[in-house]
Image (cartoon, helix red, strand yellow):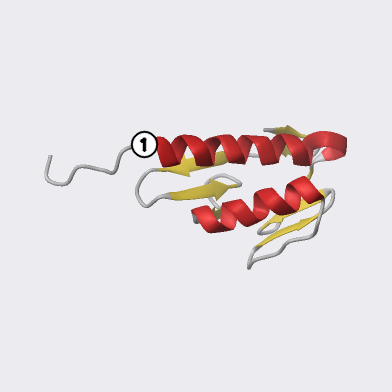
Amino acid sequence: MQTSSGLLLIEWRYEPRAYRLGGDEGVVLKAAGVERLIQALARKEPWAPGPLAWNPPILLIGDRAFNLGKRGHLVMARMLNQLLSEAEALPPPVNGG
């Protein structure tokens, strides 16, 4: 996602089922954390668990700040929601295969 502060990387990881925001040194969230972040983004409400903080319009990930701009928070909420729904639709991993 391109922001006025640079590129914001958002990655879904299959094992363990988690989401990483901010690239290699970003913050890893489980699905419940992503859902809470989506709600906060959609409502333009502050939200801050650990090293991740959303205080409209600034998203802080560790020591990096991203200005999401006028509608960037809605774009990010939609993007995360899409990743979440796609990941939930995937079958569980097959062990030993």
Please name the residue shown 79% across and 60% down the image. 46
Image x and y of residue 80, in percent: 60, 40
Please name the residue shown 67% across and 48% down the image. 38
Image x and y of residue 4, in percent: 81, 36
Give whichever of 73, 82 is nearer the camera. 82
Residue 20 seen? yes
The amino acid type of the residue labelled 1 equals Leu
Looking at the figure, which quarter contains the N terminus?
Answer: top right
41 horizontally vs 12: left or right: right
Residue, disc 1: 90
Quadrant assignment, res 94: top left
Please name the residue shown 43% across and 41% down the image. 88
Please name the residue shown 11% across and 45% down the image. 96
Characterize the local packing of mark 1: few (<14), some (14-19) or many (20 or more) Cα atoms within 10 angstroms: few
**Tag 1, which secondary structure?**
loop
1 horizontally vs 96: left or right: right
Residue 65 seen? no
Image x and y of residue 47, in percent: 73, 61
